[in-house]
Amino acid sequence: MFFFPFLNHCPCMLMFLLFTLFFTSTEAYDPLDPNGNITITWDVVSLTSDGYVAVVTINNFQQYRHITAPGWFVGWSWVEKEIIWAVVGGEATDQGDCSEFTETFPHCCKKDPTIIDLHPGTPYNKQFANCCKGGVLRTWAQDPPNAVAAFQVSVGRAGNNKTAIIAPQNFTLKTPGPGYTCNQPKIAELTEFTSPNERRVTEAILTWKVTCTYSQFLVQKPPNCCVSLSSFYSENIVPCPNCSCACQDNSFQSGSCIDSSNSSNLASIVNSPGEKGVEPLVECTRHMCPIKVHWHIKYNYYEYWRVKITVFNFNYRKNYSDWNVVVQHPNFDKLTQIFSYNYKSLAPYGSTNDTVMLWGVKFFNDVLMQAGPNGNVQSELLFRKNKSSFSFRSGWGFPEKIYFNGDECSMPPPDAYPRLPNGCSTQEVSLLALMMTSFILLLLCTYA
Ligand SMILES: *[C@@H]1O[C@H](CO)[C@@H](O)[C@H](O)[C@H]1NC(C)=O
Ligand SMILES: *[C@@H]1O[C@H](CO)[C@@H](O)[C@H](O)[C@H]1NC(C)=O
Ligand SMILES: *[C@@H]1O[C@H](CO)[C@@H](O)[C@H](O)[C@H]1NC(C)=O
Ligand SMILES: *[C@@H]1O[C@H](CO)[C@@H](O)[C@H](O)[C@H]1NC(C)=O
Ligand SMILES: *[C@@H]1O[C@H](CO)[C@@H](O)[C@H](O)[C@H]1NC(C)=O
Ligand SMILES: *[C@@H]1O[C@H](CO)[C@@H](O)[C@H](O)[C@H]1NC(C)=O
Ligand SMILES: *[C@@H]1O[C@H](CO)[C@@H](O)[C@H](O)[C@H]1NC(C)=O
Ligand SMILES: *[C@@H]1O[C@H](CO)[C@@H](O)[C@H](O)[C@H]1NC(C)=O
C-alpha cells in the first residue's frame, strides 16, 4: 500500500519518473554486471641503474563485454620526467620528442604514452607471456585464458631505489573509442610470479592496481542491436522498432546499406576489399541494426514452456566471433534445458536469479557468420513453470532486457507486445506499467 499516494499525485509521479530515467542513464556501472571491470596491474619486478622494469597486466573481469579489433589502447601520465627505454610484448603509438638524448634513444619520451598490443605472429624475441593478441580481450566467462593481456616496460629516469618510484597517474583505456573510466592506481598486495617450470615463486617489488569500468552512457552511440518478438498464441510478429540503430533515409547516401534483393549489390560487397570489421555495412531494414535478436514463445506444456532465440547478423562486414547474448527474464531461475548454446547464470543481485548469458559452442556456432542465408544462430530454452507467477498475460513471457556483446538492445514498446486472443485491455497494460514504476520507486526508496 506504500505507493498509493504517488498514484494520486501525477506531478510527483512524473518527477520520480524523470529521476529514475536520469538515475539509470548516468550510472557508471552496468546493473547486470555490477562488479564487472578491467583491472590493470602495474608490477615493478626489478630495479635498474636509472629506473625499473615493470610488468603491466590487463585483466578483463567483465562477464560479457569483450574488446574486439582494433583492440585496447592503454595510456597514463608520468608524474616526473620518466621515459620508456623499451617495451616487450607491446609498443608505444608515438615516440614523442627525444631530442634531449644524443646516444641511445628511448622507445618513448612522451609525458602521456599510449601502449598498444602487438599482432599474432610477432617474432619470438619481441613477445611476452599473454601478449600479441592484436589487443583483443575475450570475456571472463567465455574464454578466461584470452581475457588477459600483458607487456613489459623498462622505465628510465625513475630513481635508482624502491622509495624513489612513483606510480604513473591518470590511466586511460580506449578501445579505441570512449566508454571506460579508470581510477588512480592503488597500492595492492604484491603479485606472486611463478616460473614456467613451476619450481620457483618470486614476488613483485611494488604492485599497483587500476580499475576501469564501462559505461554505455559515456559512449553515447545508438544501440547496435534490436529485439523482435512473436509467440504461438498470436499471429502478430512484433518487429524491431523503426530506426532502432539508424534511420534508412538519413543514411541512404553513398550506399551505406545493402538492398539484398538486388543480387548485383551483393556481388559488389563480396568484391569490395578493406574496412573489414570497422564501420558496419548493414542490410537495408527498418531498424538498420547490425544484429537482431528474435524471441519466440514456441510451446506451452502443462509444466513447462519453450522459447526459441535466434540471433541474426545483418552486417556484411563482420563475422561476430565469440558473440554473447545476455537476457533478463524472471523465469531464468527455473531454466531446465538449453539446446546448442552455452550458458551461465549471472545472478547480479545475488538472490534474484533472473539473468543469464548465452554464447555459442566452440567450433559449432561461436562465430555468427555475416549476413545472408547462414547469418543466424538459434537455440531453444525450456523453462519449468512456477504456477504462482507464470502467465502469458501482459507480455510476461517476453524478456525484460537483452544485450548483445555487452550493448543493450532496443526493445519494442510494451504496448506493442503480442496479445493473448481476447487478451487484456490497454488499461491493464498501463496499470501494469504504473505498478512497475511504483515498484522501482519502492526499490529506490529502500536502497537509496
Ligand atoms: C574487479 O573485478 C574483480 C573480479 O571480479 C573483483 O575481484 C574486484 O573487486 C573488482 N574491483 C572493483 C574495484 O570492483
Ligand atoms: C592527472 O589529471 C589531473 C586532472 O586532469 C591533473 O590535474 C593532473 O596534473 C594529472 N596528473 C598528471 C601526472 O599528469
Ligand atoms: C632513493 O632515490 C632518491 C631519488 O633518487 C634519493 O633522494 C634517495 O636518497 C634515495 N634513497 C636511498 C636509500 O638511496
Ligand atoms: C515503421 O515504418 C513503416 C514503413 O516506413 C511504417 O509502415 C510503420 O507504421 C512504422 N512503424 C511505427 C511503429 O512507426
Ligand atoms: C541493382 O543495383 C545496381 C547497382 O546498385 C543498379 O544499377 C540496378 O538498377 C539495381 N537493380 C534493381 C532491379 O534494382
Ligand atoms: C566470414 O566468414 C566467411 C566464411 O568463413 C568468409 O567467407 C567471409 O569472408 C568472412 N567475412 C568477413 C567479413 O570476415
Ligand atoms: C540460477 O539458475 C540456474 C539455472 O536453473 C542454476 O543452475 C543456478 O545454480 C542458479 N543460481 C543461483 C545463484 O541460484
Ligand atoms: C514462485 O513465485 C513466487 C512469486 O514470484 C515466489 O514467491 C515463490 O517462491 C516461487 N516458487 C518457487 C517454487 O520458486
Image (spheres, grey):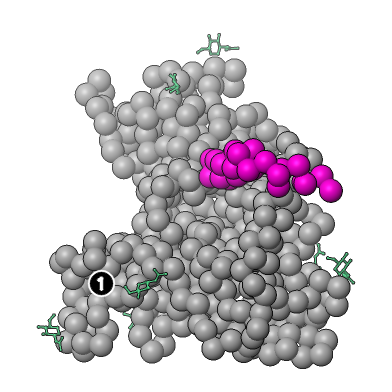
Q: Quadrant of residue 115?
A: top left
365 w.r.t. 254: above or below = below
Query: Where ligand 2 lies, by quadrant?
Result: top left
Whether residue 144 is visible: no
- Specify the segment rendered in magenta: 1-28
Percent coordinates x, y for residue 422 in the rendering: 65, 83
Amino acid type of the residue that numbered disc 1 sits on in the rendered structure: Cys
Magenta segment's dominant SS is helix
Residue at horizontal 54 percent and vertical 22 percent from the top: 165
Q: How many marks?
A: 1
Q: What residue did someone put label 1 on? A: 257
Q: Is residue 128 above or below residue 142?
A: above
Question: Is residue 3 part of the magenta span, yes or no?
Answer: yes
Side (left or right) of 369 relative to 340: left
Q: Say which element carries label 1.
A: strand
Residue 9 percent location from the top left of the image? 67, 41
204 displayed left or right of 266: right
Q: Is residue 287 left or right of residue 397?
A: left
Residue 242 visible in this rendered orientation of the protein: yes
